[in-house]
Every structure is written in structure tokens, then in C-alpha cells.
Amino acid sequence: SQQGEEDPQALSIQEGENATMNCSYKTSINNLQWYRQNSGRGLVHLILIRSNEREKHSGRLRVTLDTSKKSSSLLITASRAADTASYFCATIAYNAGGTSYGKLTFGQGTILTVHP
Amino acid sequence: GAVVSQHPSWVICKSGTSVKIECRSLDFQATTMFWYRQFPKQSLMLMATSNEGSKATYEQGVEKDKFLINHASLTLSTLTVTSAHPEDSSFYICSPLEPGQYNEQFFGPGTRLTVL
């Protein structure tokens, strides 16, 4: 089952506005990643935030992480029509011994539509 | 980023036929390959994990005899959907993984399978 729940499921905004998407997860994490998927395409890695970080920036992207609430948010500032896509958070599974095999668990995703 | 190709990008087949999907990592060696399935407006669900030269590990609920995975080389993995039925219609995405490269994973562009 999907670990992450994302909110909202769909977001429609005008160009120039900011878009905020939230993600919650259930287990302990080492890091949390955000991916983007254009319609009918594969995923592209956007940004990673480690469990000991609270905020991270990359261009127009700002990610926050609250490990006490097991939640993260992705903010896209000054959105553009080209930002229209689905956005997913993802976490990596670790076994009891702390070993990961790289298996990602994705949230349900937010469909972002930016109108020109 | 790394280049991953999938072939075909889309396929339409009759019920009962088998379909093979190829995934290639073009500029790195993938010791592990993840295969995902994505239904419309849903998130990615991991189907199976394969390591080069060994049998794939399937997620709960995924029939290993129906979804045959071959990972014979470090740059090529194939997923064969045997005796496909309309409920197998979905978007299939591969994700090859270099050892330890967990923090920025790469995905193929996906294959849209439609079973009539």
C-alpha cells in the first residue's frame, strides 16, 4: 500500500501564483524525495531533503520536512504553465538492520494545473 | 541525469496475447531494476524488483507467472505480460538503479499498454 498521502489531490492555479503540496508518511525515514511526472511520461527527480533538515531550496522549489508530524510540503513559487504536472513524494524503505535496497514508496500525488 | 529508454512507448494488443517491454539504462550499469505499474490518475505501485542475474522479487498481489521479468544484463531488463487481459491495461514504468544510488532515481518514459 502507498505510504504517503498527498494533499491536495488536485490543484488548479493561475500563472504567477504559488503552489503548495503536502505529503504525509507513516514510517521513519532517512530522507524524502519529490518527483515530477508530466502526463504520460516517466518521473523526474526534483529535490531530496534529509531527515535532519527542516527546509531546502532549489530554484523556485522550497521543501520543508517535519519529522515529528511525518509530513513534508513542496512549494513552487511564481508558477508557470510549464509546471503543470503530477507531483509525488517518495520515501525509501529500510529494513530492521538499516539496509536499504532503494525501493521507493510513493505518495498518491498531486495533479497541478497552472493556467496561463 | 541518466538516460533510460523503454520500448515500446505504447502498445495495443488483443486479450490473450503476450507483450514484452524493454527497459535500457543507456549510460550506467543497473544492478537493480524496479518495475512499476500506474493506473490512470493514481500513483506508482511497485510490481517487482530484479537484480542482474537472479530471479525477481514480486510485491504482494503481483502474479510472478503473469509478469515475467528478465534482467540478464546490467543495461537491459524486460517485462513480459503474458496472456494479457483488459485489466492489465496500464502504464508500466521501469527504474534502473546503480548500487547505492538511492537519492536520485531515474525512470524510463513508460509504456502505455492497452489490452482490447
Image: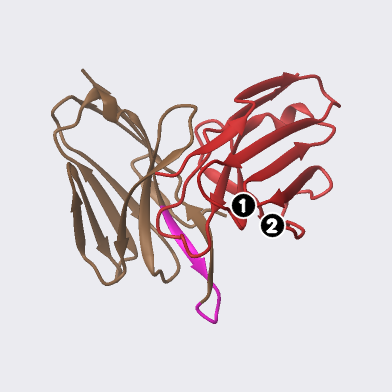
Chain colours: A brown, B red
Asked if residue B37 shows in the view, the reply is: no
Q: Residue B16 appears in which quarter of the rendering?
A: top right
Give residue A94's position: percent from left, percent from top: 51, 71
Give residue A35's position: percent from left, percent from top: 38, 45
A11 drawn magenta:
no
Disc 2 marks which amino acid? Glu
Disc 1 marks which amino acid? Met
- Give the residue number, with chain letter if any, for mark 2: B52
Give residue B13's position: percent from left, percent from top: 76, 20
**Which type of secondary structure does the marked residue at label 2 adopt?**
loop
Is A112 placed left or right of B2 in the picture? Answer: left
Q: Name the residue rendered at 72%, 41% in the picture.
A: B79
- Give the residue number, with chain letter if any, for mark 1: B33
Q: Nearer the viewer, residue A108 or A34?
A: A34
Q: Name the residue rendered at 55%, 75% in the picture.
A: A95
Chain designation of label 2? B
Above or below, A50 against A33 in this view is below
Above or below, A12 against A74 in this view is above
Give residue A115's position: percent from left, percent from top: 24, 20
Q: Nearer the viewer, residue A10 or A103?
A: A103
- Within 10 Å of the Cα at label 2, are there few (<14), some (14-19), or many (20+) other Cα atoms? some
Q: CA distance from mark 1 to mark 2?
A: 8 Å
Between label 1 and label 2, give the one nearer the viewer.
Answer: 2
Q: Which residues are magenta?
A: A90-98
**Count of marks placed on residues:** 2
Q: Name the residue rendered at 25%, 23% in the picture.
A: A81
